[in-house]
């Protein structure tokens, strides 16, 4: 049975983007990016909202500046993607299907049937999954930056006990915090 994970890079004050939607401050150091590469190999499926999918599909073209990001692109292209959108007409990348509704019961059933873990991304979609109680694990890479407001990594209404599974400090003072939610 696969697990459903929510994974974010966020500022120390808990935001994935600032009030203007900018997240350039969160660009990972190569050490952090390598950690993401190593974790991405665990996943068989990405669950995205439309906006995150449109941001991430850049990895399909394979044009990168260095070996670490090139490796990430190769990993990303091998993973299946499910995009939840009422407005996106069609997928523009292979291995991608569009779903019009995010039904937590159905998603949990589909994840349980997977052989490899799935990760839900995007604050809105992950928030729905966390509020529904279907996320098994939360991974936060907290970067040493304060943005003062914007899009929260963990939305209002998410409650319950959590258990620390792992903590790690990266060379750029970013910190991984990994928690069990279920």
Image (cartoon, grey):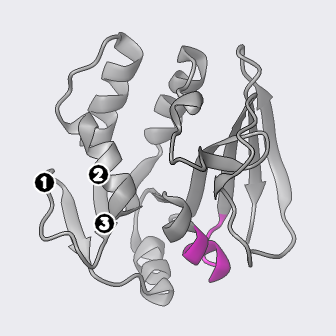
Vertical arrangement, residue 153 with respect to residue 166, above or below? below
Q: Residue at x 67, y 59 (%)?
A: 137
Helix, strand or loop for disc 3: strand
Q: Check if mark 1's residue and mark 2's residue have beta carbons within 8 Å.
A: no
In the image, farthest residue toward the top: 66
Q: Dot 2 corresponds to which residue? A: 54
Determine whether, in the image, residue 12 is placed left or right of residue 32: right
Residue 181 visible at all: yes
Vertical arrangement, residue 65 with respect to residue 8, above or below? above
Please state the extent of the stretch shown in magenta in the rendering: 127-136
Observer-nearest residue: 169 or 127? 127
Whole-angstrom CA distance, mark 2 to mark 3, is 10 Å
Q: Residue at x 49, y 69 (%)?
A: 125
Residue 67 position, x and y percent, is 35, 12
- If you read the primary sequence from the N terminus, does the residue marked by circle 1 or circle 2 appear first? 2
> What mark, if any, has residue 92 been given in the picture?
1
Q: Dot 3 corresponds to which residue? A: 83
Residue 178 position, x and y percent, is 74, 47
Observer-nearest residue: 139 or 110? 139
Residue 1 visible at all: no
Helix, strand or loop for disc 2: helix
- If you read the primary sequence from the N terminus, does the residue marked by circle 2 or circle 3 appear first? 2
Vertical arrangement, residue 33 with respect to residue 129, above or below? above
- If you read the primary sequence from the N terminus, does the residue marked by circle 1 or circle 3 appear first? 3
Q: Residue at x 45, y 72 (%)?
A: 111
Q: Residue at x 68, y 68 (%)?
A: 155
Which one is in front in this view, the residue at disc 2 or the one at disc 3? 2
């Amino acid at each position: 049975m696969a697990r459903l994970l929510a994974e974010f890079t966020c500022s120390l004050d808990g935001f994935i983007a600032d009030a203007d939607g900018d997240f350039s401050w969160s660009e990972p150091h190569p050490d952090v990016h390598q950690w993401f590469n190593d974790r991405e190999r665990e996943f068989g499926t990405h669950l995205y909202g439309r906006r995150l999918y449109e941001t991430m599909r850049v990895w399909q073209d394979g044009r990168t500046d260095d070996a670490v990001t090139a490796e990430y692109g190769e990993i990303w292209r091998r993973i299946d993607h499910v995009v939840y959108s009422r407005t996106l007409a069609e997928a523009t990348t292979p291995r991608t299907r569009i779903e019009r509704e995010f039904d937590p019961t159905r998603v949990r059933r589909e994840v349980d049937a997977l052989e490899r873990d799935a990760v839900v991304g995007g604050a809105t979609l992950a928030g729905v999954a966390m509020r529904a109680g279907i996320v098994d694990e939360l991974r936060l890479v907290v970067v040493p930056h304060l943005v003062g407001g914007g899009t929260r990594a963990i939305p209002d209404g998410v409650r319950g006990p959590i258990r620390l599974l792992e903590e790690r400090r990266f060379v750029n003072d970013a910190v991984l915090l990994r928690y069990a939610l279920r």
